[in-house]
Image (cartoon, helix red, strand yellow):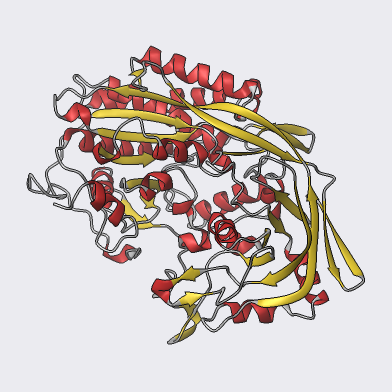
Amino acid sequence: MRILSAAIILVLAGCGPKADGPGAARPTVPEAALNAISGDQLLADIKILASDSFLGRGPGTLGEDRTVEFLEREFRAIGFEPGNPDGSFIQKVPLVGITPDPASTLVVYRGGEARTLRFRDDVVAWTRHVSDVAVRNSEMVFVGYGVQAPEYNWDDFKDLDAKGKTLVMLVNDPPVPDPNNPSGLDSTVFGGKAMTYYGRWTYKYEQGMRHGADAVILIHETEPAGYPFTVVQGMGGERFNIIGPDNNASRSKIEAWITLEQAKSLLSLAGQDFDQLKARAATREFAPVPLGLTASMNLKSTRRTVESRNVIAKLTGSDPVGRDEYVIYTAHWDHFGVGAAINGDSIYNGAFDNATGTAALLAFARAFKALPTPPRRTVVMLAVTAEEQGLLGSQYYAERPLYPLAQTVANINVDGVNVDGRTSDVTVIGLGASELDDEVQAAAAIQKRTVRPDAEPEKGYYYRSDHFNFAKVGVPALYTDGGVDFVGESPDYGTKARERYIAEDYHKPSDEVKPFWRMDGAVDDLRLLLKIGYWLAESDRFPEWRPGNEFKPARDAQRPPR
């Protein structure tokens, strides 16, 4: 996709009516609905969801039970109906939880020399198989970024037969230099600075499966990954999966990360230089490099099956036709539960990520219920499970939708709300992807705010939250983030706040409600998203993906373009 320049984003207030186009006049949202979004109520709900009594909201735990009970009770009290056509608020999501043995080690051999990598400190590994797995004397091959992208004439595998091998890969997309500016990136290849799905770690593990590899090892680098290795270590406990029809036997036996320090050491053992290999991997001419090393790992795990739950509630539309068309708001209710203690705290409360977004669903429900009459179309609140395990709850819904995808107007996703104060702008992750941008621009204009693209497109946020699963099946999906220009604060205030959160709290027990949180910015953002959902629910048109967007073909197959 192409990211629009912030310099050309102009929002038009007072557009003339165009009944069939994205510039159509939009109805005024009743004040009662806007006022129903309260900072005090939002914070109160966040505090409940992020309290120690909810035990970090881990799927398949008492914390899930308490979370689901709370959401059901609140949606019912607000006056939303059960969202499952079976008359319940629940969509069951069967998962298998797999916990690797922390005593496992990865041993790498070169001739008679052996290097042992310790679990968690040096390597974090897991399996999607439903039985214990072992990799023995598996030939290790460096395959650069592990990308095969015909549209870019790019193939990191060339003619490699990877069956039974251990593939070593770099994270993110290949950073192809701009031929006209060696210090910049070529925007015509992999989006330039912006990450594409080829850069996601999930894609790279899928590549291992496609090529029949025994194992895939990703080399962690903090900057291109977008998070420190401590975040990966946090994924070293129980991991959940949706079980495929083959019991996941087609997946590589082992999927792992290793630290950059260990990667450099192993490549040195192989007679290779990390920086030189990385530079070669950023070219089309790159070919796989056999390392002359073999890998062995016996990965034992404990397993349990879990019937986790998506929570779904709806407000039925008032129009006989419109009620069978759906605007779906999503947020993930889960976090990491109780895990390894950090500074004496083992409850991963997930206050920002994503008690804030879950509380936002309740705020939206109260706002829509405060309308004098429901909008034409049905509005759905979907709190999904297991986002932190790989977007599993939204994947399950997208693959087994309770409402037809062709009749799903759009998805609006909330994964963290602005708790640092009011901003004069709003960020759209994936700006330029769909006509939903027009709705954001119109709503921002009413609040006298500007719209900007993601400031960190290289981190691939569009592929890292639940809206992505809706986009993959063709439903236009909107994911906004807080702005960066904070009212009354220094220019670097927002950047510092984000950096502090990533370094100190992201996926750690310290992600708790902070005394310095301010809800005024969150209220602005949620009222903006309320307006967008209301306009979509009152409209008779379906927003479309922009021409050339990667998700447009799936939508066109459902609903031929107008």
Point out the image quarter for the N terminus. bottom left
Q: Is residue 15 above or below residue 45?
A: below
**Residue 549, image x and y in percent?**
31, 60
Reply above or below: 194 against 475.
Answer: below
Number of marks in picture: 0
Which residue lies most toward the right here? 112
Residue shown at the point (68%, 58%) measured from the top left: 214
513 versus 141 height, above or below? above
- Answer yes or no: is residue 38 visible: no
The reply to whether residue 153 is in sight is yes
Which residue is painted at 28% across and 22% down in the image? 315
Residue at (68, 52) in percent of width and height? 253
Q: Nearer the viewer, residue 139 or 32?
A: 139
Residue 139 in picture, x, y percent from top left: 74, 68
Task: Give how far across and how far down residue 40 sits, in percent.
Answer: 45, 24
Residue 68 placement, left or right of 237: left
Residue 160, image x, y percentages:
60, 74
